[in-house]
């Protein structure tokens, strides 16, 4: 939790933030005549508003004892204060109120993502209750139900991002409106990261409580359930914001290339589109295999310790935790090498062979496929996680039901914690890599089409 949900998510959102600042400045160079040199400071000004709104939202959250209400209230306050700041930046510095409308649309997307995430993964939400009822009929029925809800929920964030992008372009009349909308999705990053850290903190507190032999505690269970929801929202937020970042990076790619269109009647362009759609599936399979192989090694190590020192099970000796941590860390680093190399090699190789236009088709396919797959995995995993939490809070001691919800949670954990977030990173890193090597591909492609 500390590594994945704090350090990992922080690195992911930092990549989004830094990428957005770079792309906004590159595109801003084309709008100096309209806005003046201040356009290059637009993104720092925009994001400084987010810093102030984070401080305000945290002050509000501290005054509310109910964790769910505190979460929603802090998001609402952060959104309202950010909207005021966006209006001031757009009208005073940029002298263009349409940028406020565009930025507000991106801000609304992030708020709606909280609603979507809470609906599909909240511990007392309708989908989670239905999954709990399905689990009473067996693990397989529970997994079918969760998979169906994940597929349904995956469409909504894509619609939200697409609607915001179209609205922003129409209201401003130019591509810089998309930049404002994209920055609008970033403005709540501080608040979101604070709530993301909330999950591991209450998880660790509950673990300490359990290790002290205090037994079940309803307060910790309730906090953990909210923590699961906030973590699911953070992952969904990161994916929505990352999708917008990739969208803008793709627009920047076209801006540098010279806005040459992708021609779907050209077989090279269409082939690139299809390959781009396929790569996230291949990438996901390698990530899941990495989780599986690491789990096998971890289980073998735990069993070895129990076998060689039976005093561990009786609580007389402490397990060698450091060996398990070392296995997880080294395996995570080693297992990521192959999928990353394959993804980067395929895209750069295709670009070197057939040029920037064919590569653009690949990037479009990658963007659409990664966005939908990523949010699907995140929602499925979050729903399975809180279905188990719903069981724990219900007081039901049925062993078959417990086995069903634990099976779903075990299946969902790598989806929401590993595969889903990794697709966000894949999407952004590939498009930013293409943007970095764009001039080389323009000049040195072997068979440009």
Image: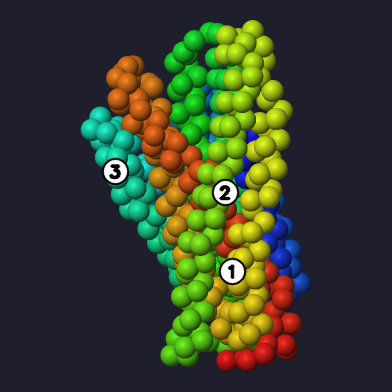
Q: Can you identify the residue that label 1 sits on? A: 248
- Relative vertical location of residue 127 with respect to residue 239 in this rendering, above or below: above
Query: Mark 1 to mark 2: distance in Å?
Result: 31 Å
Q: Spot the residue most to the front.
A: 308
The quadrant holding residue 202 is: top right
- The quadrant of the picture occupied by the N terminus is top right
Q: Is residue 338 visible?
A: yes
Question: Spatial distance from mark 3 to mark 2, Cα to Cα?
Answer: 26 Å
Location of residue 95 in the rendering, given as x and y in whole percent from the top left corner:
64, 68
Q: Position of residue 7 (x, y in %)?
A: 68, 41
35 w.r.t. 144: above or below: below
Which element is circle 3 on? helix
Identity of the residue drawn at 50% across and 19% down: 220
Looking at the image, the residue that sits furthest to the right is 37
- Classed neighbour count for the residue bearing mark 3: other residues with Cα under 10 Å, few (<14), some (14–19), many (≥20): many
Q: Residues within 10 Å of mark 1 (few under 14, many from 20)?
A: many
Going by the image, does 143 lie left or right of 366? Answer: left
Q: Nearer the viewer, residue 311 or 401?
A: 311
Residue 145 bears which disc, if any?
3
Res. 201 in view: no
């Amino acid at each position: 939790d500390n590594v994945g949900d704090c350090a990992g998510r922080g690195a992911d959102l930092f990549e989004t933030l830094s990428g957005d600042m770079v792309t906004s400045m590159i595109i801003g160079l084309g709008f100096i005549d309209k806005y003046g040199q201040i356009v290059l400071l637009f993104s720092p000004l925009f994001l400084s508003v987010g810093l102030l709104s984070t401080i305000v939202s945290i002050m509000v959250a501290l005054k509310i004892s109910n964790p769910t209400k505190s979460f929603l209230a802090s998001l609402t306050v952060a959104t309202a204060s950010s909207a005021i700041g966006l209006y001031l930046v757009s009208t005073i510095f940029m002298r263009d109120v349409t940028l406020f409308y565009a930025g507000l649309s991106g801000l609304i997307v992030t708020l709606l993502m909280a609603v979507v995430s809470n609906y599909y993964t909240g511990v007392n939400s309708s989908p989670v209750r239905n999954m709990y009822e399905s689990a009473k009929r067996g693990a397989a029925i529970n997994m079918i139900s969760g998979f169906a809800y994940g597929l349904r929920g995956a469409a909504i964030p894509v619609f939200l991002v697409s609607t915001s992008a179209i609205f922003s372009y129409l209201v401003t009349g130019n591509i810089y409106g998309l930049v404002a909308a994209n920055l609008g999705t970033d403005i709540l990053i501080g608040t979101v990261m604070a709530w993301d850290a909330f999950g591991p903190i209450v998880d660790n507190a509950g673990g300490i409580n359990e290790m002290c032999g205090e037994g079940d505690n309803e307060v910790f269970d309730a906090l953990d359930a909210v923590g699961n929801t906030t973590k699911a929202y953070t992952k969904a937020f990161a994916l929505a914001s990352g999708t917008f970042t990739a969208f803008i990076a793709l627009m920047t790619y076209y801006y540098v290339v010279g806005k040459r269109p992708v021609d779907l009647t050209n077989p090279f362009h269409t082939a690139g589109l299809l390959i781009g759609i396929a790569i996230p599936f291949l990438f996901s399979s390698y990530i899941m295999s990495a989780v599986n192989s690491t789990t096998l090694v971890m289980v073998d190590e735990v069993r070895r310790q129990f076998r060689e020192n039976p005093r561990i099970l009786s609580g007389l000796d402490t397990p060698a935790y450091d060996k398990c941590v070392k296995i997880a860390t080294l395996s995570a680093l080693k297992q990521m090498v192959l999928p990353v190399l394959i993804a980067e090699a395929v895209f750069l190789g295709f670009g070197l062979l057939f040029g920037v236009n064919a590569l653009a088709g690949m990037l479009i396919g990658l963007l659409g496929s990664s966005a939908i797959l990523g949010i699907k995995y995140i929602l499925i995993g979050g729903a399975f996680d809180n279905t188990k939490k719903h069981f724990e809070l219900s007081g039901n001691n049925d062993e078959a039901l417990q086995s069903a919800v634990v099976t779903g949670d075990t299946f969902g954990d790598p989806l929401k914690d590993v595969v889903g977030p990794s697709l966000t990173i894949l999407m952004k890193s590939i498009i930013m890599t293409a943007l970095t090597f764009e001039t080389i591909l323009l000049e040195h492609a072997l068979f440009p089409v």
